[in-house]
Amino acid sequence: MISKAPKNAKINIDVDAMQEVVNLAIRRASAFMRFGLDDLDQRDGGDFNIAASIVYRFWPEEITTESRDAAREEYRAWLVGCCLRELDLFYGVFLDKLWFALEVGELHGSQVRSNHRFDPKFARMTNVAAKQRAVAVKLKVADHYDELNSLSLARNALSHHAGVVRPQFDCNNVARDTLIIRWLAFDMVASRDGEERVVDHAPFDTDTLPGDGPVEISLRFTPRDLAIPAGHQIRLTHSQIAELCMFYKVLCEKTIEGYKSFLKEKRIILHEPEEFDASRDLR
């Protein structure tokens, strides 16, 4: 029997490109919210007809003010829901890429058969919270399972039931009759002489704080929750979408930090990423 010497395999993992998947989702959500909702109340949408070689009419000839207002509200909810689905979907893609990178890293310095197959089950998982938990166990980082699972439930309601929360299926409280969406967000806090105020608007009146000394401004990562009873539609504000974008961004960065520590433990060379190119588009 002829014994063949093992061959070395070199696999390059682009950490910056993995993180860019999440950044792309955030940029898309941010831009699409502005494209879609800026001055929405001032737009009437014309007669709501669309045309091909002929004009197709799906609405009454006379559109009432009530119908036009209702259509705006439905559009607002639809667009916000699309942004949330986008964040959930792209974060799942990021985790798929990271899981492959982890599998490759775990083989570093070892010998495997030429027909070695990587685990296909992870990519088939549809729950992003479960994906994050599996990655977090390997990297010894926080999984934020409750937050991500609640966002996945919201994604399910938006994808499969027009954003209306279904009892049992989309609910996560004990009674299974309410969806509680959870995330973490930054609060700007002003403090002086032991008293604190959350700065939720500008300009901030420092006279609401006791004393006459300097005011200290700090940022605090604070839990948020939004309860939506079964049978009600999910509606998120601009500021809530902005906070969700930042939540995914911070979570991605913390997970990448854990991956970099994993690489150091494996003594795998990590090249510093190139400076971010502000000209990157939304594709």
Image (spheres, rainbow, N blue to C red):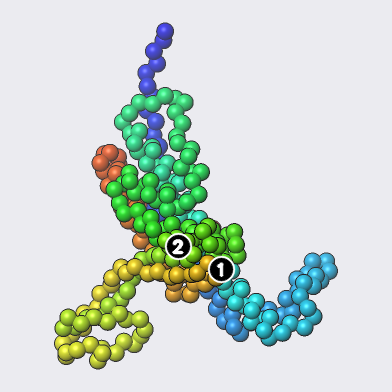
First in sequence: mark 2 vs mark 1: 2
The image position of residue 253, as x and y in percent, is 35, 57
Q: Quadrant of the N terminus?
A: top left
Q: CA distance from mark 2 to mark 1?
A: 14 Å
Element class at badge 2? loop
> What residue is shown at x 52% (from left), y 72% (from top)?
235
Tell which of 186 and 229 is nearer to you.
229
Give residue 175's mark. 2
Q: Nearer the viewer, residue 23 or 158?
A: 158
Task: Write down the residue under mark 1.
Answer: 231
- Crowd band around label 2 with a 10 angstrom C-alpha radius: few (<14), some (14–19), many (20+): few
Q: Quadrant of the C terminus?
A: bottom right
Residue 44 visible in the displayed image: no
x%, y% of residue 103? 39, 38
> Is 222 in front, or is 217?
222
Residue 247 is situated, as x and y percent measured from the top left of the image, at 39, 64
* Residue sitting at x 79%, y 80%: 61
* Residue 162 shows in the view: yes
Q: Residue at x 37, y 41 (%)?
A: 102
Binning the other alpha carbons within 10 Å of mark 1 as few (below 14), some (14 to 19) or many (20 upward) gives few
Q: Nearer the viewer, residue 20 or 186?
A: 186
Q: Is residue 89 above or below residue 179?
A: above
> Where, by quadrant of the figure, is residue 269 drawn?
top left
